Image (cartoon, rainbow, N blue to C red):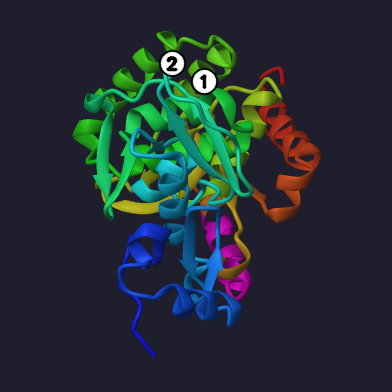
Amino acid sequence: MVALPEGLHGAYTRTEIRRVLSPHALRVALANRRLTVFSKDIVIDSKRLAEFHTRAAAALLFAGPHAVLSGESALALHGCSAARTAPIHVTLPYFRRGRDHTGVLIHHGSVDAQDITELHGLRVHALDMALAQVLCRADRRTAIACADQALALLPAIERAECRAWTEERIRNRRDPRGRQQGLALLDLATGLAESPMESSILLAIVDAGLPAPIPQYVITDLDGRDVYRLDFAWHELRIGGEYDGYEAHKNRKTRDAARDEDLRRRGWLIIRADVDDLKDPSRLIADIRAAFRHRGLPA
């Protein structure tokens, strides 16, 4: 059996694969499911069919040499785990025709060389370009989570510049749809949230008309030493919140209770959120409003 070449992450044009396999061997490989047909001109190593990089490579080969991975697909390659890896988003320049394909969405937009980088051998939009697209067009929970993760990928000193570039991208988009959403979500993103769930909790709080809390707030003792770090906090009111992810907290209930009691002795009100609050944040919002009223503020 002839070994398959590496190709582009296991994706091949038929022209490329024919350099290795004879027409008969190619038919046998397809019949035996060693290779899978992606499109008329593209085949994939069947063992790698579920891999994101392989599907992304096949999408680029399908769309042609001017194509670039964009939106959530580009963010996933940049390292944002909150970005969905299906379908594959591909952008073509306006002068190139293209059509959607199973698992591939074709967009038309900027494909300038200065907006493109190469990751894992694949052409992708630059981080700020892809982030602007997602902030404007993706659902808001996914978008805010991606924004937090994208900023977290950068050293803290570079985040302000990335935000500025992303804002400029949003304001100058040829398609104005989603512009206001994009700007509002970018304003909320800090790069400090430690999970997409924390980003979603922040969004739910702001959507309820409450002031945005400070994420990852550090509480210090009288000597300035770090004592605790809260997932979010309104520090002047001494109201803090913690998101209890299942894996992180399933064996920590006793320790969490002791921690909350110590924080209460220090004058803090602690509100806990969990996965159920992502589905319906009404209980969480009611508890936050109650804490605000306890501090003598309208909620």
| Residue 5 x %, y % | 31, 73
- Amino acid at pointer 2: Ile
- In this image, 138 relative to 157: left or right? right
- In this image, 164 relative to 135: left or right? left
Q: Quadrant of residue 8?
A: bottom left
Picture quarter with the N terminus: bottom left
Q: Earlier in the sequence, mark 2 or mark 1?
A: 2
| Tag 1 secondary structure | helix
Residue marked by disc 2: 170
Tell which of 124 and 134 is nearer to you.
124
Residue 292 on the magenta span: no
Rounded to the nearest angstrom, the CA distance separating label 2 from label 1 is: 7 Å
Residue 256 on the magenta span: yes
**Residue 170 seen in the figure:** yes
Instruction: Tell me where the magenta segment starts and ends, as one range.
Output: 249-262
Residue furthest bottom in the image:
1
Neighbours of disc 1 within 10 Å: few (<14), some (14-19), many (20+):
many
Tags 2 and 1 in contact by the CB under 8 Å rule? Answer: yes
Neighbours of disc 2 within 10 Å: few (<14), some (14-19), many (20+):
many
So how many labels did they put on this image?
Answer: 2
